[in-house]
Image: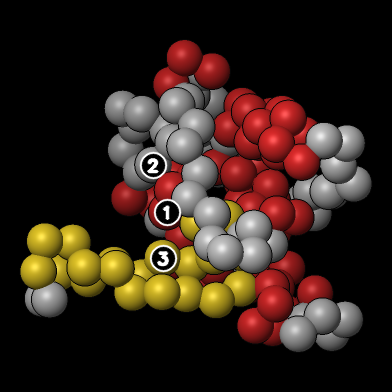
Amino acid sequence: MTTDTGKISTADIKLNPDMDEVGNLGMWSLLNSIKSHDKSSLEPEVWLDGPGGELIAASAEYLPLDYLIHYEDEELGGPELVRREYYVTPDIALSYAFWLSPELHESLFKWMKELFGSTTYTTHH
């Protein structure tokens, strides 16, 4: 299932994923890779409360939850302005990217393939 982002084209994507020290990808950085689009309904928390939460719960039957997702609070100009950055495994990041936009998914997959070489990552739709 994807969101209603049919108006997003490859020209609207400027991929700049944030990675943690083990190679997990920041969900906000993926969302912010989409330029000039109303993103309020696409925030990571929306996905995590819906299809993403279901995917992570199913995956947690086989892998530790802290391996699949963790977060870090980031200050945005002061201690009262904090955003929680969620870091997820590449497979889960691809699923979130697909939910955001098939074009973002394709761009992220190509980026991962260039960075890591041949990849066995899959997307869980």
Q: Residue at x 48, y 50 (%)?
A: 18
Left or right, 28 with respect to 96, comes to left
Q: Kindly identify the residue that appears in the image at 47 percent across and 37 percent down.
A: 16
Three-letter amino acid code at disc 1? Trp
Which mark, by number, is residue 54?
none
Q: Element under label 3?
A: strand
For the residues labelled 2 and 1, the Cα–Cα distance comes to: 6 Å
Give the residue at mark 1: 28
Q: Which residue is mark 3?
A: 85
Give the residue type that dot 3 points to.
Glu
* Residue, disc 2: 32
How far across and how far down the image is residue 77, in percent?
11, 61
Label 1 crowding class (10 Å Cα cut-off): few <14, some 14-19, many 20+? some
Label 2 close to label 1 by CB (< 8 Å):
yes
Q: Are marks 1 and 3 in contact (CB under 8 Å)?
A: yes
Residue 43 rendering spot, x and y as whole percentages:
41, 55
**Residue at (42% x, 53% y) in the render:** 28
